[in-house]
Amino acid sequence: MFIVISSYIYTGANRRLLRAHLMRLLYGSACWYICTGMFSTIEASFGQCYDLKGNMIKSPTSRPFHRRSCRQASGHWLGFDISGHCFLLIMSNLFIMEELRVMKSWAILGGLLGANSQMDEDDRGEFGPPQLPNVSRAEFKMIRSSYQRSSGLLRWVFSFTASLSVLWDLMLLATIIYFHSMPSKLLGASIGVSCWLLGYRFIFPSMEIGSFGGLAPGMPGDGPVHFVLPRR
């Protein structure tokens, strides 16, 4: 919801750019689907069936046990269970941090648009104010109007999403303390960080927003108005 509302504002409701920004959600969903599937495959492929006393159960047939047949034999399947919790919570929080970063520059966008001023449209010239020479009059009017109408809603969504991030931190702390082995947690965390690093440090910055048929996601804040402060 934060991506939808914020990109709707700073792209001036440009459908091609809106679709491009939503591709980052598709990338995150693909990371989740592929990696958790891989975790399940690893656990199923390298596990063994044990009884409640910790003794390995041998398969009564020539076929080895798999997870389902182990449960049917009243056994407990033990394999290398990469921590999906550490993976998903860390990756989600890193993605949230990247997306919410546009709010640090939101006042700058308002200043560029003159959103808090009452100057007449004719005073802005045909192509908007002097600091936005590449923005057409129609784009300028749309972005300015969206900023004024939707910034309040965006701040509420920002607060809710930031609260989710705090909740994910608490859940991550509980996972670290109570669940999984240390190698499992470290590997899950490393894969989560790798998904973020690959997307937000290599793939997204290297693509111009909306290229490749409108599918290149670009970075949060990319659009007709360049307002996001550079990373420090």
Image (cartoon, rainbow, N blue to C red):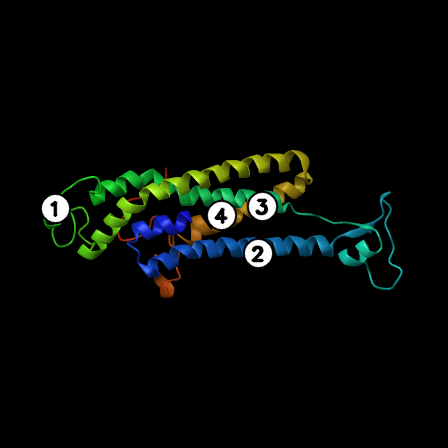
Q: Which residue is mark 2?
A: 33
- Dot placed on the residue nearer the N-terminal end, 4 or 3: 3
* Residue on which disc 1 sits: 120
Q: Which residue is mark 3?
A: 87
Q: Provide residue 177's location: percent of width, then percent of height.
A: 65, 33
| Amino acid type for the residue under numbered disc 3 | Phe
**185 relative position to 202: left or right:** right
The residue labelled by disc 4 is: 196
- Residue 148 visible, this orientation: yes
Is the residue marked by circle 2 packed among few (<14), some (14-19), or many (20+) residues within 10 Å?
few
Dot 3 falls on a residue whose secondary structure is helix
Distance Cα–Cα, label 3 vs label 2: 12 Å
The alpha-carbon separation of the residues under discs 3 and 1 comes to 51 Å
Residue mark closest to the camera, 1 vs 4? 1
The residue drawn where x is 34% and y is 58% is 17
How far, Cα to Cα, is label 4 from label 3? 11 Å
Q: Where residue 201 sits: x, y (%)?
A: 43, 48
